[in-house]
Image (cartoon, rainbow, N blue to C red):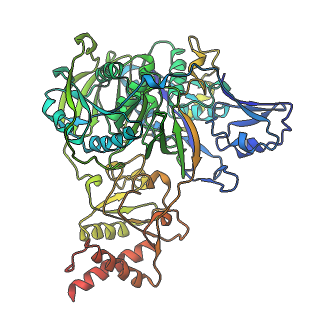
Amino acid sequence: MNIVVCIKQVPATQKVNVDPVTGVLKRDGVETKLNPYDCYAMETALHIQKKTKAKIHVITMGPNSAVDVLKEGFSLGAEEGWLLTDRKFAGADVLATSYAIASGIRQIKDVDLIICGKQTTDGDTAQVGPEIAEVLNIPHISWVQELVDVDDKGLTVRQDLSELDMIATLPYPCLITVEKGIFQPNLPSYRKKKAAKDYPIHFLTADQCEGLDQKRIGLSGSPTQVERIFTPEHDVKTMKLEGTGSEMARQVVKLLRDEKILEAGE
Amino acid sequence: MAGLVIDEKKCVLCGLCAKQCPFQAMQIINGKVEINAACKMCRLCLKNCPKQAIFEQKDDVTVLDKSEWKDILVYVEHTDGKIHPVTIELIGKALELAKVIHQKVRCLMIGSEIVEAADSLLDYGVHSVEVYDNPQLRYFRSDNYTEVFEDCILHLKPTVVLVGATVSGRSLAPRVAARFQTGLTADCTVLEMRENTDLVQIRPAFGGNIMAQILNTNHRPQFATVRYKVMDPAMKQDRVGEIHLCSIEDKKLCSKIGICKVEPKVQQKNISDADVLIAIGRGVKDEKTIQLLEKLAQILHGEIACSRPLVESGRYSVDRQIGLSGRTVKPKLIMTFGISGAIQFTAGMKGAEKIIAVNLDENAPIFELAHVAVVADVSEFVQKMIEEVEGKNRV
C-alpha cells in the first residue's frame, strides 16, 4: 500500500509589501518552511502506516530548491520523495497545479491514499486537494477531523459539515484533506532525518510524466490570470487618541457609551 | 508553451529580475536567466527589466464564444432545508452583477424534501431555483453533488457560478470547476462584472498585504467562492421566478462515500454572529492580560476572537480565529488588542462597522483601517478601561 502526502514549501514570513514606486513585491527575507498544515497530513499518514504497513511518499511542485521540503518530509517519516520541477510548470493556477500534481502522483505505482493539509498559508485557497481528486477521478472528503478507523480496504472518518458531524466510509483509492488537530504532529526527528539521507528523491519534468498533456500545465493550462496586484487602499479616517493611558481609556469608554455598546448604567 | 521568455540577445545578465522576483523563480544558471516552476506570472520582471529583454509568449488559443454562456448561478448552501445566510448574500451580489449584463440569476439547490425551502428563495427576485430533490442527496457527498452540479451547468450554461466558501462549498466548488477545466477563485472579497461578461475577481493573495485582481477570460463558467459576511444580503422583492424540479439518472448517484452516522453538531457560539468582538493577537503575551480581555468581553456582552498565533499556540480553538484561515466577521464593534493587522487577518474583519485598535507599535498596519487608534501597552490599557467602566458604575 502506498500513501502520498502532498506538501508545499511556503514563505516563512507573511510580511509582503509592494514598493509604491517600482511596484515590486518585497518579502522580508527569503526563508521558506514546510506549510504548517502539512504536518497534520504527515502525522495522519504515520498513524495509517502503523495499521497498514503502507509506504509514505511526499510530493511537491516547485524549483529545485524545493527538495529541502521533501527532506523535511523525510524527517517527519516519509520514505520516498517526488519533485515536479520544470519551467513548463511555471505560472500555474489552481487547475494547472492540481493537474500537474495529479500527473506526478500517477507516476507512483499503486497509490491507495492521498493526504493533503487543509490549505496552505501562502495561498489559503484549500482547492488543490479536491481538484487533484477530480483529476484522478477518485472520491474525496475535505476537512477530516478524526480518523475513526482504517483497514486495508479504506478509511472511516469524521467530517465537519458546519452544522452536522458526519461519520463516513471512504474506499481506496481516495483523497482526504485533514483539519489541524486531527493528530498532534511530532517534531522532526534527527534519527529519521539521518536515516533519510539515502531515501530516493525523483525529479520529474513535464516530459518525464507519462500521460501528461502539456497543454494542461503551467500558464497554458491556467484559465485564470492575475491581471494586476495592488496594495489595498484605505479610505478610513482614523482618529488617533492622545494622552495618557487613563485618558485614552476614558475616551474609548465614552465612545462605547455614545455608540450604545455600553449601557449608560454600565 | 505560454510563459515568460528571455531574449538572450538583449539580456545583459544584470540580475535585477532574479533579485526582485518575490518568488525566487528567476536564477542565473550557466550564464543564462532561467525561470523555474515557482513563477506565479506576476510579470514584475517583465515590467522592470531595464533592457526589455523579457517578454510574454502566448499560446494560440481558440477564442471562446462568450455569448453561449449566460446567467449567474448561485449554489444554495443549506442543512436539511435550513438555508445558510451566505446564500442570500450571494444572491444579493449576483443580482447586482447580472444587472450589468442584462442577464438573470438562478439558484441550484440539492437535497431531500427541500421544495418548500427552495420556494422561499423566490422572495429575493431570482429567476429560477433548479431543485434536485432526491433522498440520495439528503447529505453532502462531494462525488454525488458534483454529478448533480455538472448536470445543472450542462443544461443552464451559466457564465458565472457563485458558491459560499463554507466547508461543503469549499469542497464542492473546486471539484466541479476541475470537471469543467475552468478557473475558480477562492474567497473573493470584491466581485465586479464587465460588459463582456468577464467577472473581475479580487482576493487577498500571496499571504501578504497584497490584493490580486483575477480574470478568467477564455473559460466558462467563471467559478468564485465568497465567504459568509463579505457581501450584503439581498432584499426581499416581488416574486418573478419559478421552481424547476430537475431529476438526474440514479446511476449517476452511486457515491463511493458511505454514510455511517450524521449528528447535529453541538453549536458553539459563533464569532460571525456576535455584535461585539474582542480580538487578541500576538502582541498579548501573558495569561493575565488575556483574562482581563475576557473580562472586558463579558462587560461589553461580546465574544473573544483571535488571530492565528493564539490558535497555533493552542490558547484558543480555530472557531475563534478571524482571517483567511479562520472566519469572516462583520460585527458592530471590534476591538483589536496586540494585532498588527496582516491582510491574512484584516481580510476577515474589515467589514466591521467600528474598529478600535490597540497596539504598542504605532506603525502597525491595523491603524490604517481602524476608526480609532490607541497606541498603548495592551495590558495597561485594558486594565485602565475596566477601571474606567467599573469606576463609573460606582458613581
Which residue shows up at 52% across the image and 15% down it? A108
When asked about the image quadrant of residue B110, the answer is: top left
Q: Quadrant of the N terminus of chain B?
A: top right
Left or right: residue B165 versus residue B125 is right
Left or right: residue B158 versus residue B60 is left
Residue B319 sits above or below residue B178 on the image: below
Q: Please, which residue is most extreme toward the front here?
A: B102
Left or right: residue A243 versus residue A83 is left
Which residue shows up at 28% across the image and 36% down it? A160
Q: Position of residue B286 (x, y in %)?
A: 41, 66
The one of B267 and B21 positioned closer to us in this rendering: B21
The one of B220 and A39 positioned closer to us in this rendering: B220
Residue B384 sits above or below residue B34 on the image: below
Which residue shows up at 50% across the image and 31% down it? A94
Q: Is residue B376 visible?
A: no
The one of A76 and A20 positioned closer to us in this rendering: A20
Q: Position of residue B219 (x, y in %)?
A: 49, 25
Left or right: residue B237 versus residue B27 is left
Q: Position of residue A109 (x, y in %)?
A: 50, 12
Q: Please, which residue is most extreme toward the bottom here?
A: B395
Q: Position of residue B215 (x, y in %)?
A: 52, 36
Q: Is residue A38 visible?
A: yes
